[in-house]
Amino acid sequence: MTCFPWPKKSINKLEGLLRAFFWQGKSKTSGGHCLVAWDRVIQPRCAGGLGVRDLSAHKQAMMCKFVAKVLQFSDIPCYQWLASQYCRNNLPSGNSSRDTAFWRGLKTYIPLVLFSSSCSLGSGALVSFWQDQWLEVGRLMFVLPVLYSFAKDKLCSIQSQITQDGWDIQLHPNLSHTATQELQVLLDLIANVTPTDANVDHRVSSLFRKELATGYFYKMLTFRGMRCAFEQWIWEKIIPNKHKVFLWLAFYGRLNTRDIMFKKGWSALVSNADCDICPTVESIDHVVLWCRSAEHLWGKLQLNSLACASPDLLSFFERVSQQPILKRKWNVALAACVVTLWHARNDRVFNSASWSDPYTRFYAADLLRLWLHRAKRQQDKDDLKTWTLCLSN
Ligand SMILES: [Zn+2]
């Protein structure tokens, strides 16, 4: 898996097993039981997923790390051999009749490694002159784009561009006026740079200047550029894992409330989409914000008007977070309330049990007491005790 391409079919099969185990604890599952698309589940938590390992990205990350080892000095024979066999004067691109299937699989990751790393220069044999970042100003292909278009070999190594007499940049003839100007800039930039065998070519990550590891490439490959709005509120150590996943599903509105079940056509379970105690559709937002059973609980925390005015659970949390005089760990208290309201709803639907308003409050307070031992800092414990008192008095 580290250096051989892993067949897509095999990844799909394994992901199928993971998916079935995650949603149903079985080896097979159907689409109706998967509450959230797997593509979202495997996104990092900061991007709104559950952080389950994306096998395809993980495979690519491991191969990138292997290629990175080939494209810098190494005292390990297999990396040395691959570098001397396939990367003599330039970093390979395109297809070559000399390529083995093994190398063809690795070669596709070379651009990714080049563009996510920067180099400290040794002999320059394994560093791309134009595409690698080995000068402070940046990658020459972007700094001097016109001159780059005249380069004879776009992936030539630094070592191939220097002779005993100095720099000898291999360019096509008849340079344009702009290219001539850029050539002068280039010669000024590299006038004091001399590749030497005394040092070794070494690559580090472009972003953090650290060793290139699988985790770094995995982060790059799974980065979505968007931060999840509710990540900070649910991935809290004090909240137990099963409740974190419940809240995650609640924020996406994917729990099996009557509206969802009705949409799925589960007519054997539900005949309509309405709440059993209110004359309106039962969605998760209804259950935890607007249902008659939620009114007293939010009233006790003086959040009832916010709950009624919020269009969904996410907006409710956002509005609560903007309250200026709110006590710390409010997200944990709200999480306990949301879990409580869901338990009350399930008890009502499946066991025909009706929870009184004080019982609902005490249930939420008991949940907070149960979670208390998960708080490590005394300050957090004190905050949770305050919320518990607020709910139980
Ligand atoms: Zn209701």
Image (cartoon, rainbow, N blue to C red):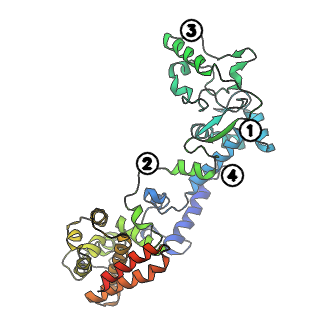
Q: Which mark is residue 385?
A: none
Q: Earlier in the sequence, mark 4 or mark 1?
A: 4
Residue behind mark 4: 2
Tell me whether the residue at label 2 lies in contact with that at label 4, contact meaning CB atoms closer than 8 angstroms: no
Q: Nearer the viewer, mark 4 or mark 1?
A: 1
Instruction: Please give the residue where the numbered disc 1 appears in the rendered image.
Output: 73
241 to the left or right of 277: right
| Residue sitting nearer the eye, 158 or 382 | 382
Between marks 3 and 2, how big is the CA–CA gap? 43 Å
Res. 239 in view: no
The residue located at (51%, 27%) in the rendering is: 142
Task: Residue type at mark 2: give it.
Answer: Gly
**Between marks 1 and 2 in the image, the one whose residue lies nearer the viewer:** 1
How far apart marks 4 and 1 lie (CA) works out to 19 Å
Inter-mark Cα distance, 1 to 2: 33 Å
The x and y percentages for residue 48 are 43, 59
- Cα separation, mark 1 vs mark 3, equals 37 Å
Amino acid, disc 4:
Thr
Pick whichever of labels 4 and 3 is earlier in the sequence.
4
- Asked if residue 100 lies left or right of residue 115, the reply is right
- The x, y position of residue 160, in whole percent, is 70, 23
Q: Earlier in the sequence, mark 3 or mark 2?
A: 3
Q: Alpha carbon of mark 2 to alpha carbon of mark 4: how far?
A: 27 Å
Which of the labelled discs sits on residue 174, or is there none? 3
Instruction: Quickly name the residue at label 2.
Output: 225
Residue at (64%, 35%) from the top-left corner? Answer: 119
Q: Tell which tag, 2 or 4, sits nearer the viewer.
A: 2
Question: In the structure shown, which secondary structural element does the residue marked by tag 2 occupy?
Answer: loop
